[in-house]
Image (cartoon, helix red, strand yellow):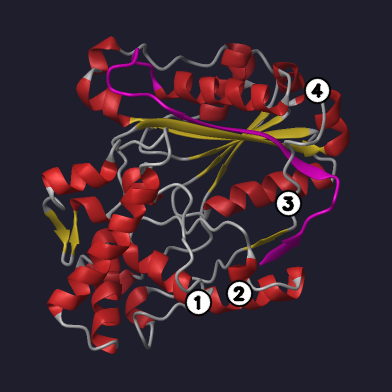
Amino acid sequence: METNVQSNIVIAGTSHLTKRPHDMPCNVIELMCEATQKAAEDAGNDAILSVVDQIIVPQGTWTINNPGGLVAQHLGIAAKSITYNVGILQSSLIKRAIEDVNAAKSRCTLIVGGEAKDYERNVSESLHAIPTLSDSRRQESSEFIQPADLPISRYEIDMGLIKAPEQYALIENAYAHAHKLTRESHQELINNEWEEMARIADSIPSSWIQNAHNHLKKNGWGRTIATPYMLHHVTQWNVNQASAILITTQDVAETYSNGSDGFIFPNALIESNAVIPLTERSQLHHCNGLHHIKNEHVRLTGKNPSESQFHELYSCFPIAVRLQREAFELGKRPGTITGGMTFAGGP
């Protein structure tokens, strides 16, 4: 599924926020509100929040019924709240925002998400309670989006093959078998890939694991999660992080900024939502959707993905990143500017 983006749609402001364990603890709603404030400042003026009329939030590990409504209440704005459940591509939130702004269903949409799981695990007694919605706020529009299809089959559920690490480990091992890799050479491949991730994460001040490369040398790869994956090969969700994106029209954005130099003009958005459960694939390590995405990218932009200046192949597991690298023919070009979910943070 692809979206051709009109030239007047802009990402006006963005933010990424990391709170260290020694910082003043805050709950996840407070974290998302602070990220929102910083995105507004990045847009040029926090008064842009006055035109936000839609807030989209990806479901986290927390259980909050209407997180967008609580963010709106905290910021004192009137906005429709939409929550996207786990199992939906993160790009779908951006696609919805762009399409709604383009169709004049929204003047300005805020996408915001966060986790405060590290604080919740270690200093829960110091956190403010998650607030409740006022009676008037409960009357405002809210929506909860579920994935169209389950990513796993009934057979896999009955067999107990339901955890993501186990499924991705199967794909990883199928890849090793198809490429005739020994156990040692396969493990070396994964380690080398993730050492490069750590090196890049070291250049990003907001990375959750600081000095990641030295951290690996000192602590190793950690306990086994699902062979061949160890703790420091997979995503890290015990973080205190939030991100926010403001999507609007160029006219609205320019009203609240000093110029358009910081705006991002999306060109195209492509995603594949076809669901083929793992055990129903003829070759476990093949992902046909990636090749379709590459072809659509060429059709819509006239360029191969490898010609882009930056790439962020963000995924919970090494095999997903490697399959994208190969499908998009990146060669030795970096596949990340953040250091990935293990070191930069996630989920």
Horizontally, residue 319 falls left or right of residue 217, namely right
User: Is the residue 328 above or below the residue 216 in the image?
Assistant: below
**Quadrant position of the N terminus in the picture:** bottom right
Q: Is residue 14 inside the magenta stretch?
A: yes
Q: Which residue is tagged 1?
A: 327
Using the image as rendered, state which of residue 3 and residue 143 is in the foreground.
3
* Image spot of residue 178 (x, y percent): 29, 88
Q: Is residue 22 inside the magenta stretch?
A: yes
Whether residue 174 is visible to the viewer of this picture, yes or no, is: yes
Q: How far apart are marks 1 and 4 (CA)?
A: 40 Å
Q: Which residue is tagged 3?
A: 266
Q: What residue type is labelled 4?
A: Tyr
Looking at the image, is mark 1 or mark 2 earlier in the sequence?
2
Q: What element carries label 4?
A: loop
Say which residue appears at 42% left-offset and 33% top-offset: 206
**Quadrant position of the C terminus in the picture:** top left
Q: Residues within 10 Å of mark 3 (few under 14, many from 20)?
A: some
Quadrant of residue 234 within the rendered picture: bottom left
Q: Which residue is tagged 4?
A: 256
Say which residue appears at 46% left-offset and 22% top-offset: 31
Q: Is mark 2 on a helix, strand or loop?
A: helix
